């Protein structure tokens, strides 16, 4: 029989998509740091070209920025974090349109799980109207996409960032005696 135990905390991962960075970037960065702590990874702008799904709402050209935060996070906080990012999207909205899309997730040594407000066959309900989306798994030294992984997350340009983030997370776990 397995004995229940708390998992190691994860690295809070946040993907931001927008075509209007000048309208919010500094203010949002301050709000995120107040809620989640110091950022320890900020990617350069990454062109978002895999789909036009967000073009009508966010405008073009859309770029992504990935952030992670220094404080590690209990894995059972993912729904709470998603609700908070939804609140921030609404606060900055212009009428019915968002000016950015926030995709929070938790990165562990084994996987990247994103939060979603939408159900789908592979998503697990975690409470408060939020589902956990197993997006990528880490197998034999690299990120592996799954049949449902969004094309942008399956891309090498995103996986390169995720490899760097995972390595930094591993070093942080070692430094904090969590391995």
Image (tube, rainbow, N blue to C red):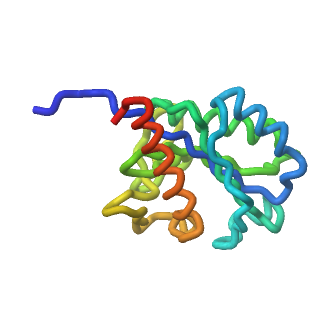
Percent position (x, y) of residue 147?
41, 68
Percent position (x, y) of residue 142?
40, 63
Quadrant in the picture for the N terminus: top left
Q: Is residue 157 left or right of residue 10?
A: right
Which residue: 74% across, 60% down?
Answer: 45
Q: Is residue 69 above or below residue 35?
A: below
Which residue: 47% across, 38% down?
Answer: 172
Q: Which residue, as the protein is rendered here, is positioned at the far front?
A: 175
Q: Is residue 61 above or below residue 138?
A: below
Percent position (x, y) of residue 69?
60, 38
Figure label count: 0
Quadrant in the picture for the C terminus: top left
Viewer-side residue, 122 vs 172: 172
Residue 36 picture quarter: top right
Which residue: 76% across, 39% down?
Answer: 29
Percent position (x, y) of residue 53?
68, 66
Q: Is residue 130 above or below residue 110?
A: above
Which residue: 84% across, 41% down?
Answer: 26
Q: Which residue, as the protein is rendered here, is positioned at the far left?
A: 1
Q: Is residue 74 above or below residue 112?
A: above
């Amino acid at each position: 029989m397995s004995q229940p135990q708390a998992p190691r905390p994860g690295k809070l991962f946040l993907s931001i998509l927008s075509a209007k960075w000048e309208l919010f970037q500094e203010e949002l960065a301050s709000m995120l740091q107040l809620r989640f702590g110091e950022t320890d990874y900020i990617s350069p702008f990454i062109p978002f070209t895999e789909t036009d799904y967000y073009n009508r709402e966010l405008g073009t050209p859309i770029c992504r920025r990935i952030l992670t935060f220094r404080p590690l996070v209990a894995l059972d906080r993912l729904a709470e974090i998603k609700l908070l990012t939804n609140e921030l999207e609404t606060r900055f909205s212009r009428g019915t349109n968002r000016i950015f899309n926030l995709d929070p997730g938790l990165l562990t040594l084994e996987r990247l799980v994103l939060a979603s407000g939408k159900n789908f066959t592979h998503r697990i309900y975690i409470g408060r109207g939020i589902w956990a989306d197993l997006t990528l798994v880490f197998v034999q030294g690299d990120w592996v996409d799954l049949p449902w992984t969004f094309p942008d997350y399956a891309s090498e340009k995103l996986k390169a960032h995720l490899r760097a983030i995972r390595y930094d997370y591993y070093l942080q776990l070692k430094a904090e005696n969590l391995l």
